[in-house]
Amino acid sequence: MSDVENGSEPATGIQNRWQVPSTWGSSWELAVEVGLQHFGKMWLCAVAIVLCGMAVLILWLHDIYQKHKNDACDQPLALMLRILYAMLPLHCLKREITRCIFCYNPARDGPTKPWYVKLFNGALLLATLAWPVAAGKMLLDTQSCNEDLVLAIEWVIVYYFVVAFVVFITPVCIVTVLMFLYQRRFISPPRP
């Protein structure tokens, strides 16, 4: 009968390959640390490129909107651009809105947010995530609309996916792979 079958520890010098080298939390922290050491600069460059591209896209969208805001269209695509323009400053000024309009300061009032701050943050997040879904549905239903306006909405939807990939999906995948490699002892902890 082997050591594993009778419930005892494996013999000295033999590593149990099913034993996790550390807790889930510490391996996750280590994976984030290793990921930032190796890929942090590349990720920050990618985020900077995405932000510069977003600035160019916003300027181009403004030009398209100004030219075609009163054009006849069977779907309210110009309204979708207006909604997008309303969401952008709300995201940029979210902290100031929370502090000045809702009078909530985490340093003074504590980390627990009041219900109205949570409602504002949740509504803004919901609007941000629902926008490409609603715009995509409108694009599918569009029969007669200005081609530039349709192209502008298509580019915004594509850009949503680019931002999601660069900012969220890529880091999560890299950290997950690094955590798996660390737990299987394919990589060692970084040396100080």
Image (spheres, rainbow, N blue to C red):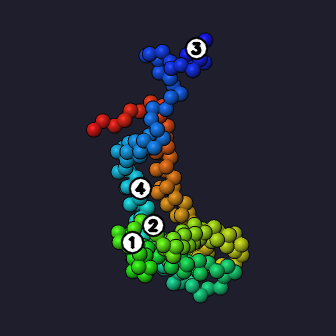
Q: How far apart are marks 3 and 4 (CA)?
A: 52 Å
Q: How far apart are marks 1 and 2 (CA)?
A: 8 Å
Please tell me whether mark 3 sits on a helix, a strand or a loop: loop
Give, as a three-letter code, the residue at label 4: Ala
Circle 3 packing at 10 Å, graded few (<14), some (14-19), many (20+), is few
Q: Which mark is residue 46?
A: 4
Q: Which of 106 and 163 is in front in this view?
A: 106
User: Measured from the top left, where is residue 115 in percent x and y?
Assistant: 52, 73
- Relative to residue 122, is residue 168 depicted above or below? above
User: Measured from the top left, where is residue 183 in percent x and y?
Assistant: 47, 34
Q: Quadrant of the C terminus?
A: top left
Quarter of the figure with residue 154: bottom right
Residue at x-position 38% and y-position 32% = 188
> Are dots 1 and 2 in contact, CB under 8 Å?
yes
Front label number (2 vs 4): 2
Please tell me whether mark 1 sits on a helix, a strand or a loop: helix
Give, as a three-letter code, the residue at label 1: Asp
Residue 124 in view (yes/no): no
* Residue that label 3 marks: 2
Residue at x-position 49% and y-position 37% = 180
> Are dots 3 and 4 in contact, CB under 8 Å?
no
Front label number (3 vs 2): 2
Please tell me whether mark 4 sits on a helix, a strand or a loop: helix
Q: Which mark is residue 109?
A: 1
Q: Residue 112 carries which label?
A: 2
Front label number (1 vs 4): 1
